[in-house]
Image (spheres, rainbow, N blue to C red):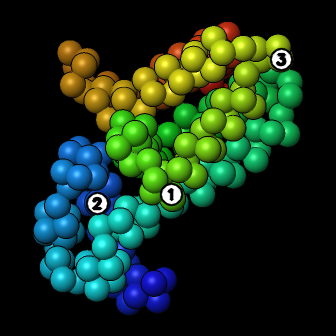
Amino acid sequence: MQDRIRDLGGSAPLLQSALRQFATVGFDGASLQRIAADAGLSKSSVLYHFGSKEALLDAALRPAVEELAQLVDEIVALSDDPSRQAFLVRFVDYLFEHRLAIAVIFNHGQALAGHAVVDRADALVRHLAVCLKPAGGGDHDTLRFGVALAGAAFMLVAADRWAPDHVPEDELRAGLVDVLGEFVLGRQAALPS
């Protein structure tokens, strides 16, 4: 399948189109025809290169899930608070970079259970929640992490709908670092200067 994707001449616009559709209307509501047209391709070309909408979902989400796996590996080694605060800043940067994939995974993940890439993302997020939980932390801390992460995912794609004026990226980023720091670490995470 990788050879077919390479033959497409670069699949980034198609994968971005797919992520936009999946994030907006969900996997079931997304149409291969709309995804292909948005990317300037034919539906038959998309099917030739990916075989199915499920394969397109996998290819679109895979980079975000692979990077999440790297972040989880990184947090496992951290134990002191300053390192964990710095990790949260990197994590917010990750959320920004993969905002559409994160929206698909968190906002539509329940409906996508059983898709291998989504199941892997769910397992990684559960592991991340355990790693970020304070020593001796319990279910309440896991709940705080889930609320913070789901809220961050939502705000990354809906901030303009909820704010009276456009929220500049740097303000949104700083706000998410602060809120995640408060929710996850129980204190404000400082942005690097």
Of mark 2 and mark 1, the one earlier in the sequence is: 2
Q: Quadrant of the C terminus?
A: top right
Numbered label tally: 3
- Please say if 91 is above or below 150: below
Secondary structure found at label 1: helix
Q: Which residue type does callout 2 highlight?
A: Ala
Horizontal placement of 21 versus 171: left or right? left
Q: Position of residue 73 (x, y in %)?
A: 76, 47
- Between tags 3 and 2, which lies in front? 3
Image quadrant assignment for residue 38: bottom left
Q: Residue furthest front?
A: 114
Q: Going 35% across and 78% down the picture, which residue do you hit?
A: 50
Cα separation between marks 1 and 3: 30 Å
Which mark, by number, is residue 18?
2
In percent of width and height, residue 150 lies at 45, 27
Q: Quadrant of residue 178?
A: top right
Across and down, in percent, residue 176 comes to 50, 23
Task: Please report the residue visible at 62 percent of the width from the left and 31 percent of the height from the top.
Answer: 89
Whole-Å distance between the Cαs marked 2 and 1?
15 Å
Q: Which mark is residue 117?
A: 1
Residue type at the position of mark 1: Val
SS at badge 2 = helix
Separation of residues labelled 3 and 2 (CA atoms): 40 Å
Which circle's residue, 3 or 2, is located before the other in the chain?
A: 2
Q: SS for tag 3?
A: loop
- Say which residue label 3 marks: 135
Tell me whether circle 2 and circle 1 mark residues in contact (CB < 8 Å). no
Task: For the N terminus, give its image quadrant.
Answer: bottom left
